[in-house]
Amino acid sequence: MSAKLQALRADITTLAVDAIVNAANTTLMGGGGVDGAIHRKAGRELVNECATLYGCRPGEAKITKGYKLPARHVIHTVGPVWRDGTRGEAQTLEFCYRNSLQVARAHGLRTLAFPCISTGVYGYPPEKAAKVAVDTVRAVTAEHPDAYDDITFCCFSDSDLNLYQELLAA
């Protein structure tokens, strides 16, 4: 059985899933956008645990508890900063999704929610990022058909939601 893939517009910090994915920065100590929102809602314990992880490189993924979030865990991944698309950005973004899913699988986490990684201040074009996200998640869930139940692409805007819904319908 393959995972159900869906897109929805919501605040990722409100989702009761096994893990939400955090579009983190390399320090893992919080920041703006979704990263800041996750840290604020999870509470000080998340910062304390992140301090023990010694950062994260682009494309890697590391896991923490969810603390005050409805999600049991947070998988932190650092997306690429968009430059011009010729400096490995797509491969790094693919690694974000692959490694996050691998961490989830290693911990028996079956329901996940991803934000739109790298499309905020990191400047990745949303259309290109959505295609990498959907293609990669489809490939990984096909490789491991019994590992996941539900994968949600959690979108902050209607325009992002429309991109994901179109890709998922194709």
Image: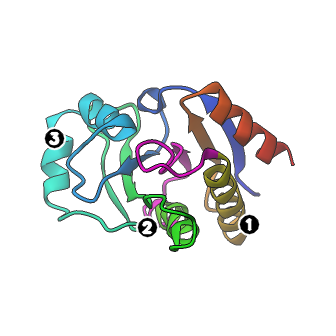
| Badge 3 element | helix
| Pointer 1 or 3: first along the chain | 3
- From mark 1 to mark 3, how far is it between C-alphas? 35 Å
Position above or below: 63 against 33:
below
| Left or right of 35 in this view: 139 | right
Check contact, mark 1 vs mark 2: CB within 8 A. Answer: no
Give how far across and how far down residue 57 sits, in percent.
32, 68
Side of 52 relative to 146 (left or right) = left
Kind of residue at disc 1: Ala
| Chain-order first, disc 3 or disc 2 | 3
Going from the N terminus, do you reach mark 1 or mark 2 first? Answer: 2
Q: Which residues are magenta?
A: 102-126
- At label 2, the amino acid type is Gly
Which amino acid is tagged 3? Glu
Element class at badge 2 = loop
Most extreme residue toward the front, as rendered?
84
- Residue 146 in view (yes/no): no
Q: Which residue is mark 2?
A: 59
Where is mark 1, residue-wise? 142
Specify the color scheme: rainbow
Residue 94 placed where, x, y %? 57, 66
Nearer the observer: mark 1 or 2; the answer is 2
Q: Is residue 138 left or right of residue 125?
A: right
Quadrant in which the N terminus appears? bottom right
- Predominant SS of the magenta segment: loop
User: What's the distance in space between the residues labelled 1 and 2, CA to CA?
Assistant: 21 Å
User: Is residue 127 left or right of 53 when viewed as pictured?
Assistant: right
**Residue tagged by mark 3?**
45
Q: Find out whether residue 130 is within the magenta segment.
A: no
Q: Residue at x 12, y 47 (%)?
A: 48
Residue found at x 84% / y 43%? 169
